[in-house]
Image (tube, rainbow, N blue to C red):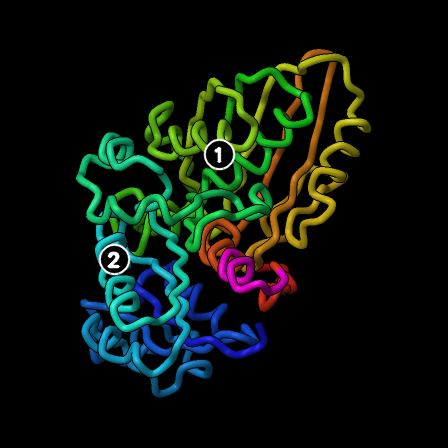
Amino acid sequence: MSEVLPVILLGGSGYVAGELLRLIAQHPRLTLAGAVSNSHHGKPIVSAFGHLATAYPTEQFISMQQAIDGLAKSPHWIVLSAAPHGASANLIDQLLNTAEHIGLQMTVVDASADFRYSSATRFAEVYGQKHSAPGRLASFSCAVPEHLSDLKTPHAAQPGCFATAILLAVVPLLSLELAQPEFFVSAITGSTGAGRTPRDTTHHPMRQNNLFAYQPLRHRHHPEICELTEAYTGQDIMLHFVPQSGPFARGIHATVFAQCAGGVAESEAVDAFKKFYADSSFVHISSSPPRLKDIVGTNNAMLSVSTDENSIAVCCVLDNLVKGAAGGAIQWVNRLAGWPDSEGLLIAPAGWV
């Protein structure tokens, strides 16, 4: 496929949407047809994202109806959703219904949680609300792109940012038989992971020079991590996950501990991880514990592996807004369109951010 495809972006004014807009602007085969935002409808995109003024100097946010009315302009559409959990599925369903009615091809990637579970019942248990488009669940697959090469559905869902960081460590530990299926995780996230609306836990005076845990052992990504690990490895795991809020804007640093499954030298474990991710453009195994500054703003994830006589520890860093959300979603677009995973995503880190 060589043509440039138009993109409809849902939930267009949040942080993940801002990153999707940035990535669309630099992608050689994607062009923005419209960014849907109820709260910013009719306003310039730069009113929400001043840093994108050169990429979108005149474009305005559009309504959902405008997006639907414009579908007849192209035979093939990409839909990227950064809409809130619980709202995304209904918006996607409206667009798919219209595309099916008028005979258009539409490829959807959802960055919300609405299609991360295959069961509407499970979604309701975790998020405390009914799924708004349960009939669409079977047409979506959810996984870290590196963990699912044979996609059997027409649409995809990107796992959560914490889930992505932890799965990048846990899945190879199990698949390579390096660890027992019980994992202890401490992971620190930047304030952008909580969204754009200021709250006590995200407001800068509360985050600056501060570090605190939240929802220990009961974070909503916990069941998602367990289910996606089982889907890839066929094994149930025990997960003990403590998320923490860090005094920085973007990035996740996750440390995953487990008991070794058998005697394995650290060099052997490192080599096994390198081989596991040998075909990935974005997952890199570091010889020393990775640092956030080396990956912020990129779709890269960096991991290190350490062992002693009984334990194995994997440190993983990634940008929560890129590899953990928007970048992972663009990876899925590339995969679904038949393009290389790296198309439009090879971004050099800025450094010293």
Q: Spot the residue most to the bottom.
A: 58
Quarter holding the C terminus?
bottom right
Circles 2 and 1: CB atoms closer than 8 Å: no
Q: Main secondary structure of the magenta part?
A: helix
Nearer to us: label 2 or label 1: 2
Q: Residues within 10 Å of mark 1 (few under 14, many from 20)?
A: many
Q: For the point 57% across and 46% down, which residue is it? A: 150
Tell me where residue 76 sits by quadrant: bottom left
Left or right: 253 in relation to 123 = right
- Does residue 11 appear in this view? no
Q: Is residue 334 magenta?
A: yes
Tell me which residue sits at (48%, 34%) in the image: 187
In the picture of the structure, the residue carrying the numbered disc 1 is 187
Q: Is residue 106 above or below residue 325?
A: below
Mark 2 neighbour density, 10 Å: few (under 14) some (14–19) many (20 or more): some
Answer yes or no: is residue 307 visible: yes
SS class, disc 1: strand
Image side of residue 97 versus residue 213, left or right? left
Q: Amino acid at mark 1?
A: Ala
Q: Is 171 or 312 nearer to us in this picture?
A: 171
Mark 2 secondary-structure assignment = helix
Determine the image quadrant of residue 90.
Answer: bottom left
Q: Residue at x 25, y 68 (%)?
A: 101
Q: Position of residue 115 (x, y in %)?
A: 34, 45
Tag 2: amino acid: Asp
The residue carrying mark 2 is: 93
Q: Which residues are magenta?
A: 332-340
Vertical relation: 29 (above or below) 215: below
In the rendered picture of this protein, how many numbered marks are placed on residues? Answer: 2
Distance of label 2 from label 1 (alpha carbons): 34 Å
Q: Is residue 128 magenta?
A: no
Q: Earlier in the sequence, mark 2 or mark 1?
A: 2
